[in-house]
Amino acid sequence: MKALITSLILLGWITVMSPVNLYADNVAEEDYDVELTESDNNDVVIRDPQNKGHRSAPMLTSCTISYRNGVTIFSIEGTVNIVSYEIWGVDEETCLGVYNDERMFLDALYSSKGKYIVVFTAADKKYTGYIWLE
């Protein structure tokens, strides 16, 4: 009986003292809420570097990007079927990757930290927004 109690105490001590892997700072656990601007696929993007003219604020569409649950766009039109996923630098000139697969997109996006532009292309619309991975 004494040997059994000693074994249980030793087992409990080993369990408590064994290293535990904690991933408290794992970026893949983060969900990001992103505001997207919506445009038609045939729209030509015209940049006005001098900010001249009168423009109204674009209508924003909410989106959640989650490593576990994927990309969800909350459109008033219902479910959005994304055909391609793009990651751009914030300079709007450097394309860091174009993906047809959501998992490949998420792996690439979550692999590094920084500020990026994400572009989701659906059959008839494009959704563009900024994401900051810390």
Image: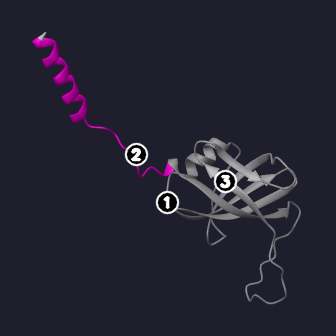
Q: Residue at x 24, y 34 (%)?
A: 16
- Reading the image, the residue beneath label 2 is 23
Mark 1 or 2, nearer chain start: 2
User: Is 78 situated left or right of 36 in this image?
Assistant: right
Residue 64 numbered mark, or none: 3
Which is more toward the observer, 100 or 80? Answer: 80
Q: Residue at x 84, y 57 (%)?
A: 125
Q: Residue at x 77, y 83 (%)?
A: 48
Mark 2 or 3, nearer chain start: 2
Q: Amino acid at mark 2?
A: Tyr
Q: Residues within 10 Å of mark 1 (few under 14, many from 20)?
A: few
Give the alpha-carbon distance from disc 1 to disc 3, as whole Å.
17 Å
| Percent x, y of residue 118 | 67, 60
The question of residue 25 being in magenta is answered with yes
Q: Amino acid at mark 3?
A: Thr
Residues marked 1 and 2 touching at CB (< 8 Å) = no
Q: Is residue 116 above or below residue 27?
A: below
Q: Residue at x 86, y 60 (%)?
A: 41
The question of residue 13 being in magenta is answered with yes
In the rendered image, the quadrant that contains the N terminus is top left
Which is more toward the observer, 63 or 111? Answer: 63
- Reading the image, the residue beneath label 1 is 113
Display coloring: one colour
| Percent x, y of residue 8 | 20, 19
Q: Secondary structure at mark 3?
A: strand
Q: Residues within 10 Å of mark 3 (few under 14, many from 20)?
A: some
Q: Amino acid at mark 1?
A: Lys
Looking at the rendering, which quadrant does residue 36 occupy? bottom right
Q: Secondary structure at mark 2?
A: loop
